[in-house]
Structures are given as C-alpha cells and as structure tokens.
Amino acid sequence: MGKYIIKRLLQLIPILLVVSILAFGLVRVLPGGAAVAYLTARNIAPTKESIAAAEEYLGLNQPLLTQYFIWLKGAAAFDFGVSYASNKAIAPEILGALRNTMGLAAAAMVWLVLISVPLGIFSAKKPNSAFDHFSRGFAFLGASAPSFLVGFLLVLLFSVKLNLLPSFGKRNFASYIMPSLTLALGYIASYSRILRNSLLENMRSTNVLYARARGLKEKRVFSAHTLRNSMIPVVTNFCLSVGGMLAGSVIVEDVFSWPGMGRLIISSIEARDYPMIQAYVVIMALLYITINLVADILCAAINPKIRYEA
Amino acid sequence: MEPVLEVKDLNISLKEGCNTYKAVENVSFSIGKGQTLGIIGESGSGKSLTCMAILGLLPADVWDYDAEIVLNGKSLPFRDNKAMRGYRGTDIALIMQNPMSAFNPVMTIKRHFEETLAAHKNWNKNQIKAAALEMLSQMRIKNPETVYNSYPFQCSGGMLQRIMIALAVIMEPSVLIADEPTTALDLTVQFEIIKLINQMRKKYNTSVVIVSHDLNVIAGIADEIAVMYSGFIVEQAPAEEVLNSPLHPYTAGLFRSRPSYSKERLSEISGQPLSLKQRNSMCMFSERCPLKGEGCSNFEMLAHKVSDDHFVRCCAKEMTKTSA
Ligand SMILES: Nc1ncnc2c1ncn2[C@@H]1O[C@H](COP(=O)(O)OP(=O)(O)OP(=O)(O)O)[C@@H](O)[C@H]1O
Ligand SMILES: [Mg+2]
C-alpha cells in the first residue's frame, strides 16, 4: 500500500509541471495582454507610455523563460503575487475560498452517505416495493433536475415560504444545509441506485450462498459479504466522478452566493485578474489531482485486487 | 444400522406468478455413518436443488418445497432459516462446484476460517489459526501459512477447492455435501480432490453426498448410487449393482457414453432432457428412450422395487417383472 501511494505521488510531478506551463502561457496568449488588463483594473487609460511602464513594473519585458521561472519559483512557495483587482496577496484570498468550497463538498459528502446508503439498502431489501418505486422516482428526478433549479426551489421553500434557512452567503452552520444538499442531490440519486442494483446482484452471488452455507449469522452475511462487496462499484464510480463534483460546485456557489472557488473564478474572469486566474488553475489542478489520488487509494483500500495488480 | 441422514419424499417446485412447476419429485434416500451416496445425472436434473434443500438454502420466494429430512434421528427445521444456521457448517457442510466464485474476493483465507469458526465455536484467533493450518496441511498444501494469509484470487482453483474441503471438515460435520466438487477443475486435480474427500470421510467417519455428472467420479467413491433424471431418482442401488447391472435405460445409456480405453465409439444418449415447463404425465425419459413402448406415455414414474436395496422408475422394467 505504501509503495502504491509513493508511486502515485511521483506521477504527480510531470502533471503539475505541464499544468504550470499551461497556466503561465494562458496569460501570454490572451488578447490585449496582461499590462492592459492591469491598467484597466487600476482605471488607468492604456497609452503607449503607461503600457510600457506597466510592463516594466510587472516584469513582462523580460525573456519569457525568465518570467516563467520567476513565477514558478513563487508558485512553488505558494506566492502567486498580487491580485490586479484587489491589490492584495493572492494566496490567502484563494485559500479562504478553497476552504469554503471544501467545506461545501464535505457537507455534500455527509448528505451523500447519510441518504444514499440507507436508500439503496431499503430498496434492495424489498425490490419493487412501494419504497423501491418511490426511490426510483426520486433518483430519476434527482439525476435529471439541474442544480440551479433545485437550488431555487429549495430557496423558495425553505427561505421564502418557511423562512427557516438563510438563502445566500456563508454565515453559520445553517447556511451549509441548502447549498450542500443541492450539490449532493444528483449524486445521492445515482449512487443509491448503483448501490441497490449492486446489492441485489450480490445477494444472489455464490459467495453469499457459501457464506450462508457455512452457518454465518444473517447479520454477518449481509455486512461482511453482501454490503461490503456491493460498496466496490459505488466507491469506484465515485472515484471516477469526484472531479465532476468540483465542477458542479461552481453553479451551486453562484446560486447561493457562496464565497468559494467558483465565485472567485467567475469574478476574476470578469475583472481579467490574470494572476488570480493563473493561481486558480494551478490550485484547482492540484486539488483535482489530490482528490483523485485519495479516491484511488480509497478504491485500493476497499478492493484488494487493485492493490495487488498495481 | 441407524442412518445419519434421511430424506423422505422431497418435492420441490418452482413458483412463477400463480404457476408452479415441479423440479424435484419424490426424492428419498438415506445414508449410513461413513457411507457415500453418489448422485449422478445430467445438467438440470435437480441435483443441486436436492442438496440446497437439505441445507434449507432454497429461497422461499422462488421455491416451494416439502419433505421430511432427518439428521441423526432429529427432524431438520429446514424452513426456518435461523434455526438452520446452527446446522449449516457444523452438522452439514457444503463443498461447492465453483471455488473461484464461492470465496469472497475481498477477504483473505484467514478471515474465511475465522468467520466460519467464530459462528460456531468460542475459539480465539490463535486456536483458529493452529487448527486451520493443521487442516490445510492435511489437504497437502505445502505452504499453509502463506496460503492462509492470501486472497482467493491469489490461489488456483484446485487450491481453493482444497481450502473449501478444509473449511468443511474442520468442524467435523456428520454429513458432507459435495455438489460437483471437481467440475470446474483440471482433470489431474479432479482425482486428487476426490481422494482427499474420501480420506477425510474415512478419518472423521463422515457421511458424504457427492454429486456429479461424471460417472468416473461417482464410480470411484460411492457406496450407493442414485441416478437422477428430470427431477426423479430413476434408479438407485448399491454402487456395484448399478455399475454391473444397470436396469434403467437412462443409466445404461450413461454407462455407454462413459469414455473408456476401448476402441469402441463413444455413444451418447441423443436428445435433450425436458425443461421444467415441458414436464407432463408421461415418462420423462420416453422421448429419448431406446426401449420406448406403449405404456410410456402415461407412466407416472412410480418406483419399482427390484430388490430390497435396488429400485427403478421405468415402465418397461415394471412390465417385464410383472409379466414374468
Ligand atoms: N433460480 C432458478 N429459477 C428457475 N429455474 C431454476 C432455478 N434454478 C434452477 N432452476 C431449474 O431447476 C432445474 C434443476 O436445477 P439444478 O440446479 O438442481 O440442476 P443440476 O442437476 O444441479 O444441474 P447442473 O448439473 O447443471 O448443476 C433445472 O431445470 C433448472 O433450469
Ligand atoms: Mg448443479
């Protein structure tokens, strides 16, 4: 297991280098250039002289390779320079947003486990019962409803009509409830079905029959054999789609004005805040890779076959 | 001699909507201590259903079944899943056909032993390990310690089948049911597995029910042979008698299709057995029978006693007997 993790960590280095080149190159190829964007953000008219001065100030007149290495050196130490828009250091600002997004994702994960596991188990215990049909309908709706719509409906019900939960921003614990539920809903819908089908298949499997034939208690047969083995496809699927959750959070953050990475990047693009965009790309790539790594390790932990093949 | 296991009038039918289809009919047999009953018959004849019924492992929402099953003088509560749990693994152990899919791929062999023994005995992990390693080496596994700590997918089919025998015999059950224990294995390994089962039978004086559609397997080990066809035992007698003077045309056909070293052409029984839904009130075998005659079309598969321990379900035999 240790070897497997080290191998995966070493694979990260080339990926991150490519990402850094892309993030750096992005700003160089955009029309207008960084200097103009800087001046616009400062409300200074972009004349020949002011552009030259800005290029001098931002170090844009140095050779490209030198610029890249200066930037890379900073990025490696988590120093991404100063935001054009706010004139403040980028790293603390982006880390604050990152923490909010991660908090949202973690809360969504709690919903996911809390709802989809029991839903999957109860539908599998009595297939084609009323409950199973209800959960199938719920899964169909949940998987096909776009999250902005779900978000608006929740706000309408819990904030406007019932006045129970805050409709936007991050103020207290209650502010987490609706955005995280919105983010989780699509996943709850599909994972509860994956779990149900996988449970039904495993209930009829030879190894469950053999477990019963050895005289194991029904509880043990279910938890150690049926359920345990049924979690494998659920976790594997989750590992594949965990990146999508990050992407999905952009929409949810926008709907609920959540001060996370999604909102940060939208406002930065609007302001053409290039250093911020660069930092965002690098940090998101890092995050994406790390989450995938954790997901893969989770898969290897639950399925010994993967450990031995790697 | 008091029989260890007695199955009386086992009837199993498949439930489908409001219809039921008979899958196993009037199966009765008994096995004495340390004896081996061989059940032979082609695919779909109801051999596995019979085995699973004894263990009470047929799901009640699919199968309807009725019988009297007596183990060591006590009637088995085969309908009661909870009560049966105490018998499974301890009194009646099962060896399955496909060792590759019977073991749980995410659990080590060690955990399989631990959970099985924990379900029935108050042993600690060291006692379990000692007993398991001892059992594994009796199965002629050369590096029991390594095997004990490995995952099923790291073992070969033959290895897993030995482990399965070890897991069954470790509880010293009074009955061992082996449902086609060699079908999934290489020919060279098959012989070895049969020999191991036989050795364990002798050592622990276990009664064995062994199922196969391979006559060579049955002939080598069984004291008594039951031939199944379409849910019926069509012939049953001591092994010698069945092998030397088979009476049912199906049994005779089976023996002719048995590969041997003679130059004689391998003759098969032509045709297909009836599926559950095709079965009706005529002799199940009549469509394929070389002796088919008048009486076959409404023969109710009654058992005809040839001698005290030999019976056959065939109207041709019944006729010859009565007319003689
Ligand atoms: N779950 C099921 N649903 C419907 N029919 C079934 C089911 N299981 C078995 N059957 C049918 O019941 C009959 C007997 O099956 P059984 O498994 O006992 O045969 P078998 O003698 O063990 O054959 P094999 O040599 O293939 O293992 C077959 O006709 C089979 O098609
Ligand atoms: Mg079978």
Image (spheres, rainbow, N blue to C red):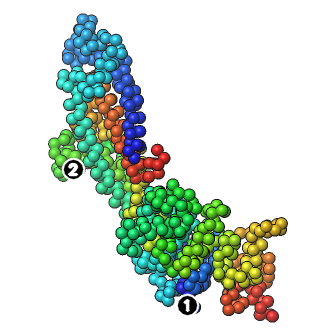
Q: Residue at x 60, y 82 (%)?
A: B35
Residue B309 visible in image? yes
Same chain for mark 2 and mark 1? The answer is no
Q: Secondary structure at mark 1?
A: loop
Decide if residue B232 is in sight here: no
What chain does mark 2 sit on? Answer: A
Q: Is residue B115 above or below residue B146?
A: below
Front residue of this view, candidates B246 and B1: B1
Does the beta carbon of the residue at mark 2 sit less than 8 Å from ligand 1?
no
Q: From the viewer's perspective, is residue A277 above or below residue B312?
A: above
Residue B195 location (% of width, % of height): 62, 71
Rounded to the nearest angstrom, the CA distance separating label 2 from label 1 is 74 Å
Residue B244 locus on image (x, y percent): 75, 81
Q: Amino acid at mark 1?
A: Glu
Q: Amino acid at mark 2?
A: Phe
- For residue A170, what is the image quadrant? top left
Identify which residue is drawn at 23% across, 34% down.
A95
Q: Chain of mark 1?
A: B
Spot the residue most to the top.
A49
Q: Which residue is mark 1?
A: B2
Q: Relative to B83, say whether A220 is above or below.
A: above
The answer to which of B90 and A268 lies nearer the viewer is: B90
- Secondary structure of the residue carrying tag 2 is helix
Q: Which residue is mark 2?
A: A158
Quadrant hosting residue B9: bottom right
